[in-house]
Amino acid sequence: MARRTPAEARVLGLWTAAWLAALLVAGLVRLGDPAVQWPVLLVPLVWALAALARGR
């Protein structure tokens, strides 16, 4: 498997963080209590920040 360029790694990390955020929001709205469980949304935010930092 070929090694990813920094730009590809950044895009893949942001894409994954966006999907993770969307699935977590859907799960919170459907099954959870967003007023109490909102801190779980910090996980995709940290993931996206790590993807941005890794791509530089």
Image: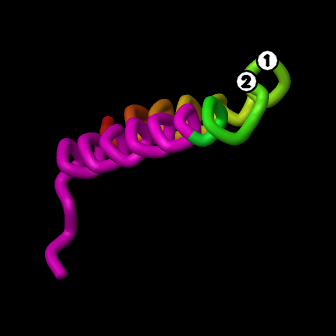
Taking the spot 20% from the left edge, 69% from the top edge, the residue there is: 3
Residue 34, label in figure: 2
Let me know if residue 22 is in the magenta part.
yes
| Residue 5 in picture, x, y percent from top left | 18, 54
Whether residue 50 is visible to the viewer of this picture, yes or no, is no
Residue 25 location, quadrant: top right
Amino acid type at mark 2: Pro
- Residue under pointer 1: 35
33 lies left or right of 56: right
Residue at 49% from the left image edge and 31% from the top image edge: 49
The residue drawn where x is 39% and y is 36% is: 18
Q: Which residue sits furthest bottom?
A: 1
The quarter of the picture where residue 37 lies is top right
Looking at the image, residue 4 lies above or below residue 42: below
Q: Is residue 41 above or below residue 13?
A: above
Q: Are marks 2 and 1 in contact (CB under 8 Å)?
A: yes
The part of the chain drawn in magenta is 1-26
Q: CA distance from mark 2 to mark 1?
A: 4 Å
